[in-house]
Structures are given as C-alpha cells and as structure tokens.
Image: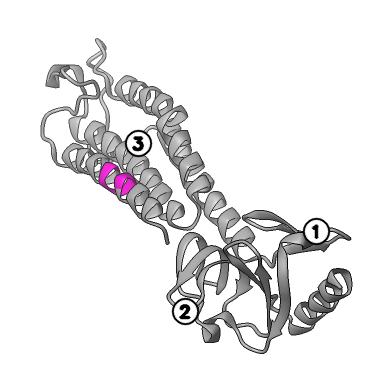
Amino acid sequence: MSSENIFFAVICWVTSLIFGAIAFCAFKRKDPMHFWSGTTVSPEEIEDIPAYNRANGLMWTVYSLCILVAGILSLYSMKIGTILLVTVCLPGSVFLVLAYKLIYKKYKRTSDTTKKRDLSRPKTPKGLVIASIIITVIIFIAMGFLFYYGEKDPEVSVYDDRIEIKAMYELNIDFSEIADISLIDKSVSDIGIGRRTNGYGGIGGALKGYFKSDTLGESIVFVQSKASPTIKIERIHPRDLYINFRDSDSTKNLYNELIAKYH
C-alpha cells in the first residue's frame, strides 16, 4: 500500500469525522439545527424540533459514511476512491441542499395551528429516507464492483510480439522487453513478494499492482497469493512480472503458450 493511498484515505477519514461531528451535534441539539454557516433557525420556525434535528443528523450521518467508504476504497484503488469522493463532494453537495430544504419544509411551522404533528411518533421525511437508501445502495455497488474485479483472475492475451494483461491494471509487454520466462512451483506468499506500494490487495487473496521487497526489489503482480505455481517474467527494465490463476492448470497452460511464442 503506497503512502499516497494512505494519505488520501486519512484525509477522507478526517473529513468524515468532521461531518460525523456535525451529525452528532444535530442529534444532541435542543434548539433547531441550522444548515448554512452564519445562519440560524429560530425555535418559532420549527414545529417539531427533536424530529427536525434527527432528520438533519441522519442526513449528515449518511454524508459522513459516504466519505468514510471513499477512504476505505482508496486503500485498494485510488481511482475508485477518488471517483466516489468527487461524486460525494459535487453531486452530493446538491443532494445536501435539496435534502435540507425538504427537511425544513417538512417541519416548518405553518400558520394553521390546528394541524399539529403527533410528537410521540416523529417521522423522517420520506424523500430523505429514499435518498439515504439510494446512496447506501450506490456504496455497496461500488464496493461490490471493487471486490469482483479485484478478486477476478486477470485476462491475459498472448500475441506474436507482446503480452496483453487486463485486470484492475492494464499492461502491455513486448517480447523484446523480456529477458526470461520461468515457472516457479511456489505461491507469491512463499516467494515473499513484499509489501504493496500501489494496487489491490483484497480479503479474497488476490494481489494486483506494484509491490516491493528487499530480496526481489520492485515487481508487478497479477496473482492469487496462495495459488501455485507462479509465472515469473523477468524484464530487461525494472519490475519483473508475476502471474498466476486460481486454477494451476490454467497457469501452466499460459506458461506453455508464453514459451511457445517467446521462443
């Protein structure tokens, strides 16, 4: 895991804590929560202050969780984490404004004093609930997308002059760059691939991206960490390449295809 990934994630988490603190304040406030900086909402404006504050607290909680998830995803893929953060910050800001207006309209005191809410059963605006559900679904879809493509075996195509790899990282290697191709009867865990500097290292055992160790130096891997054997492609330039699949026969078939084309 690279320092850039960690730094980005920490920024997301600190930001999430800030919005989480706003949510906490909304839940605990006795007077009405305001939205815009420098503005106030008087108690006379709101008919049901506790319900109004709870709705605001829920809104800020959802927003905080979205940023928290963006930080988590960025540890595995900076691209996905950044996309989610930008989505939360730009369209998400519009959502916040619309959601708050909906909350304010829902709980604004009307001139008709004969129509009062049942304070024993405060209700959250339906629009806010629906929006919260949609955002939660989007978060889970993003996490599912990351897990699916992260754990999926790489797609490797062997041509007459090059190797093309499609995974979370796409890589093309000309045969002219290759010094040697070998089949190691070990997994990368046994080989000792080192620490991830940038890329994916999910809970399912798949490793994809850039790694560095004291013994092997810098390398690029597209592997299942516990699977064996492993194909090692030594390159003339830095960063050797390691590839394998869950199925050992698939790894051996790829090795035979590479040797046939390379020689």
- Number of marks: 3
Q: How is the image coloured?
A: one colour
Q: Quadrant of the C terminus?
A: bottom right
Residue 27's x, y, as percent? 20, 41
Classified by dominant secondary structure, the portion drawn in magenta counts as: helix
Q: Nearer the viewer, residue 59 or 108?
A: 59
Q: Residues within 10 Å of mark 3 (few under 14, many from 20)?
A: some
Q: Tell me the quarter of the picture where residue 225 sits.
A: bottom right
Q: Tell me the quarter of the picture where residue 106 sits.
A: top left
Q: Where does label 1 land, which residue?
A: 162
Of all residues, the one furthest to the left in this rendering is: 30
Q: Is residue 17 above or below residue 36?
A: below
Numbered badge on residue 215? 2
**Element assignment for label 3:** loop
Nearest to the eye among marks 3 and 1: give it.
1
Q: Residues within 10 Å of mark 2 (few under 14, many from 20)?
A: few
Nearest to the eye among marks 2 and 3: give it.
2
**Element assignment for label 2:** loop
Residue range of the region highlighted in magenta in the rendering = 11-15
Could you tell me which residue is drawn at 21 percent across and 29 percent down? Answer: 48
Question: Hey, what amino acid is under mark 2?
Answer: Thr
Numbered badge on residue 143? none
Q: Where does label 3 land, which residue?
A: 124
Q: Residues within 10 Å of mark 1 (few under 14, many from 20)?
A: some
